[in-house]
Amino acid sequence: MIEIKNLHAEVEGKKILKGVNLTINSGEVHAIMGPNGAGKSTLSYIISGREGYNITKGDILFDGISMLDMLPEERAAAGLFLAFQYPVEIAGVHMTNFLKAAVNSIRKMRKEEELDALSFLKLMKEKVKKLGVKEEMLKRPLNVDCSGGEKKRNEILQMAMLEPKFAVLDETDSGLDIDALKIVANGVNSLRSPERSFLVITHYQRLLDYIIPDYVHVLSNGKIVKSGDANLAKELEENGYAEFEAA
Amino acid sequence: MQNLKQPKKNKIFEDFQSESIRLFEKYGLPTTKLERWKYTKLPAFELTCSSKCDVSDKKYLKPISDAADIIKKQIFSPEKQYDMSLWDMNNAYFTDGIFLDIPKNKIIDTPITIKATETGNIRTIIRVGRNSNLTIIEKNASESKTIKNHIKQIILEDGAHLTHINIQKNDNKEAISLSTSHILVSSNANYNSVTINMGASISKTQLQADIEGENSEVHINAINKISGKQHADITALVKHNKPNCNSSQFVRSVLDDSARAVYQGKTFVGRDACKTNAKQMSNALIISNLAEMDNKPELEIYNDDVKCSHGATCGFLDEEQLFYLRSRGIAQHDAKLILIEAFLNEIIELYPENIIKVIKENMGGS
Amino acid sequence: MAVKKETIEQIEKLGKYDAGFVTDIESDKAPKGLNEDIVRFISKKKNEPEWMLEARLKAFKCWEKMPEPEWANVDFPKIDYQDAYYYSAPKMENPPKSLDEVDPKLLETYEKLGIPLREREILAGVAVDAVFDSVSVATTYKDTLKKAGVIFCSISEAIQEYPELIKKYMGSVVPYHDNKHACLNAAIFTDGSFVYVPENTKCPMELSTYFRINELNTGQFERTLIIADKGAYVSYLEGCTAPMRDERQLHAAVVELIAHDDAEIKYSTVQNWYPGDETGKGGIYNFVTKRGICEGRNSKISWTQIETGSAITWKYPSCILKGDNSSGEFYSVAITNNMQQADTGTKMIHIGENTKSRIISKGISAGKSNQTYRGLVKILPGAKKARNYTQCDSLLIGKQCGAHTIPYIENRNNTAQIEHEATTSKISEDNLFYCRQRGINEEEAVALIVNGFCRDVMQHLPMEFAVEAQSLVKVSLEGSVG
């Protein structure tokens, strides 16, 4: 489903990614772990098409098609979702209106019929119930005055609404206590399906206790330096990243 | 006002001065029709004499004629030509002045004191050389009925730091104090000024800082502490012409009796001045029901990558704070003084200890 | 690349001002130019009583001597007052007695603009007065309103039917010599709306006037007068559009509001006059004097405006807070794009004790436009415990626009409390990217964020118009990103 081929990228002339290779098939959950500054967040931004990154070599294929020339919204319409490490606050824009704009915009790009207000609300209520999000959240301006946990739960709700084929979770566990972490992980797990794949980016192993990955990769100094199964994460927890940083 | 001294023409300025006399005679004193003078009305007066400041440290003084190029350069942005009349008057009639020229890489720890005490057109030029650092304490004081038209031209070269304390303490309640400063700021420079207006019947302090280099800072702070029929006006303009600079204008006024204070502040951000960070804030405490505060914090912005804010508040002492102090046994009068002092301290305490000491000594009373 | 394609589409869309069509209808015009005879002509056309003509002539004499206001931050060539028509009316044999007698072309015009005038098709609960060039062509729901005691008619009709009210109130808030534009209006106003809500009456529906300039080279000079008697309440909305033309057209209106004891007037404007094209050609000069007086105790006047149109806007809806405990509000969204210029804001004059005012202004500048917020808060010595809160925020989109904030705050009472806050910022890249990652394209994302930025103001619009205003935000910003 997604193929990252020999990806090299720079920010303001500084080389951040130095040849990343990664293939994720339908239904798989991959985790990328690594020390701070390894290029984990850069990778998530480049996949989703944020400006300001210079891709010097390589390609990203989504269902066999290169995404590099696509706008962020076109990538979203193709089925890509990024759960942000720091979801932004947008004053005055209510979560419900925002989600409706997003859902219908994507439907429009996919040449599907837009949802009317009623069917949208119905769909949203279903998802809200399933994920256990407080309905009161929907009436608030987007992420404004929300706790870290509430923001991350909003991200998962948005993911549920937009039903992506491929979701990137960028340090979703940062700033969460253990209870919030469980709720978010349960949300993600409920969205796992044979048609949907995930890339979970994290610094700590603890998130992977709740979202069990099929594969674990270590990203260090702009490259994937080791790959393995879920056990690799446990090893890292014990030994730290020291051996990779030295390398 | 009659002429105390006949102007002795300085040859270097001859042409320049005759043109200034022509302009001044054409336009006369500024009137309230000018936006910059909207809230301040000057009585008619004539001021054709010149006077000069005393400087505590004469080491860096040079003859005023050495600053001819600086003086002749028209740099103040007038709203209209006749807004320049204080400059024209000063240009026309000053015969001598101060040129304080600090060479590069001088860190001068002891503040230099400049005193202006006499009626007249006063001219002061200050140039702070590259990477030099200096504090100037300016005292504008007198016990008799003086009229001063003080024009200051200040140039900060790359990396220069100037802390500029202006204390206006003309005890005579009929004195008129007019101070107009133009400050040219180069890269990595820092101009930090505080003006304290306590005396005179009318004081008008105009400051314009042009930021012409990157990574510089300009801070223009002021305190108006006036009573009786005093009138104090702070009119400031900071022009951001280059990226990555910060500026602030903080003004606090305490007004008793039928005093009136004016703050007209403006931040200008030009097309090239991205990443500008600029703040303006004016807070006034009005003690008496006859006092008046007029605020005009203005923004003019032509760049979208900026953070600019301005604010103004105006009101009486906080009743709850007052009550709190009184409930702790402090008499009402003292409680008021404590709160006023605290209110003004928020500006004074932006400066280092030795400066705070000087300011407090001069402010007395509180 | 995709970006390029988007830009091309945006440029094509720029010419898309939905209300820019012309209605082909025969009209009855005064000769070109402005002089005393034109004033007499207008008065005669309206069959006005002598006192009205005298008032007009007095204003005209004053206007001739008055200087143009030059302090505003707008720049335009001097207006040639002699090169325009001051009266133009769709030809009608006699004034229509019912909608069936109104020219179908006119009804069609309003329908195209989304303002159907036939009552059965009308937005439920909104009565409309439709002004076409210089005359009011129809007023709906008149009878329903009459039953409640509310007078809602054209100002021409009011001069005939309610001369005592007109004599008492017209010019009482905006005197004819107030400023050059108001003075011109007092001399040559052609039509407008009149509302009187009697004591202790809540007006049973939203009132609304729809202004349309159709004729070439014609100015529109309407006059609106709204009186809410003791304990009355009324909510009023005006909308404006004009065809796309290369020539500049002048619109100099006057609106006066009077609120007596315990009365409340809510006045909303959605101003979408033709703004001119992207090079600044054509468009309306919108020079408007709007002022309300809170005459009585506990009265309230609230102005809400969404300003997206006009080449030049010069407008300061104000409140004179005379009655004790009275309050004034000003909620404004102004959007300028391309070459538009706007100098707008408000004045709050506190005279009575315990008077309150609140100003929320949101300015959005895009393209090469320039926008100024200009406001005055004045607390007079008698205004004990007066309160003002002002918040004015500016948003810049692009590198070539300008935003200016000029607040005048004059306080002469020590028990007054005044707070003023202002910020200038841009749409953050982070917010934009977040929206786009969720599938919302750049233009939609900007509209969404701008609508969020304006929310504090939008929520004060009557429900029926809030949706329209939101889509107007999007249309106004077309072509501003990318």
Image: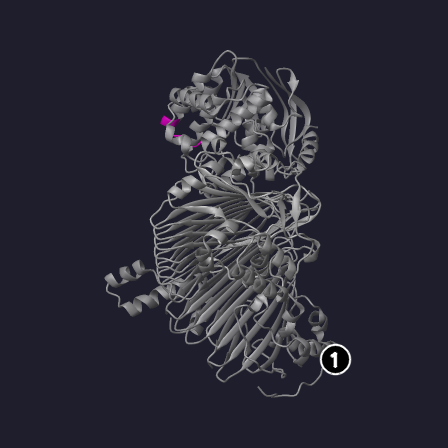
C268 vs A46: above or below: below
Q: Residue at x 56, y 23 (%)?
A: A106
Q: Give the residue at mark 1.
A: B14
Front one among A12 and B173: B173
Q: Is residue B218 visible?
A: no
* Chain ID of residue with mark 1: B
Q: Is residue C151 visible?
A: yes
Percent coordinates x, y for residue B240 in the rendering:
62, 55
B202 vs A8: above or below: below
Image quadrant in which the C terminus of chain C is located: top right
Tell me the kind of residue under disc 1.
Answer: Glu
C420 vs B70: above or below: above
Specify whether residue C50 is painted magenta.
no
Specify whether residue A175 is painted magenta.
yes
Crowding at label 1, few (<14), some or many (≥20) Cα neighbours within 10 Å?
few
Q: Which residues make up the magenta segment?
A: A174-180
Percent coordinates x, y for residue B123 in the rendering:
63, 76
Q: Residue at x 63, y 39 (%)?
A: C480
Residue found at the far top of this picture? A194
Percent coordinates x, y for residue B16 in the rendering:
73, 76
